[in-house]
Amino acid sequence: MARIILVAFLLATLVAASWLPLAECAERVTCYNSGRKFTRARIINAINSFCSRYKGQTFANGRKVNERYDFPSPETGHIDISAEAFRGCSFRMDENECGRLLRRPTDECNTGGENGKQGGYVQDDCRKFKMDPNA
């Protein structure tokens, strides 16, 4: 009987511990909600270029990359996109995951329509992906 209780206790501890990283790594989206506005199509073009450029690269703790994408009229301006690893973490850039993360502030902020996007960032406890048309 004591063995069964010990096994149940160890199993419960293992299951509870396996959930902790998920809670700690929850993605949080922060919206800028001010400044220059861009169409979603221009932003997606910049995101695709950024993610393609860095796919397969390793982001060790402290590595940050920032790219500027300039656009002529009618939306004259630029979009800054960045990715970084921090808090002792590292990751390998997956093109699809990069696109998903950068589309979150694009699609979850300024939700009044497809266009008029002002950017933001998504962050967890290890990495941050930023899309900023206000830079």
Image (tube, helix red, strand yellow):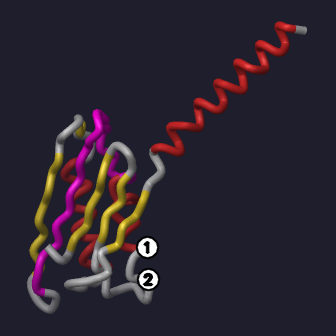
Q: Quadrant of the N terminus?
A: top right
Judge from the rendering whether residue 99 lies leftward or rightward of residue 80; answer left or right.
right
Residue stretch rendered in magenta on the structure: 76-97
Residue 87 highlighted magenta (yes or no): yes
Q: Picture quarter containing residue 43? A: bottom left
Relative to residue 75, is residue 47 depicted above or below?
Answer: above
In the rendering, which numbered label is found on residue 108?
1
The kind of residue on which mark 1 rests is: Glu
Q: Which residue is mark 2?
A: 111
Please give the name of the residue rendered at 26% of the width and 62% of the height, measured from the top-left corner.
130
Judge from the rendering whether residue 34 lies leftward or rightward of residue 96; answer left or right.
left
Please give the name of the residue rendered at 38% of the width and 82% of the height, measured from the top-left corner.
110
Give neighbour class at mark 1: few <14, some 14-19, many 20+ (Cα, 10 Å). Answer: some
The kind of residue on which mark 2 rests is: Thr
Please give the name of the residue rendered at 66% of the width and 25% of the height, measured from the top-left corner.
13
Relative to residue 74, is residue 51 depicted above or below?
Answer: above
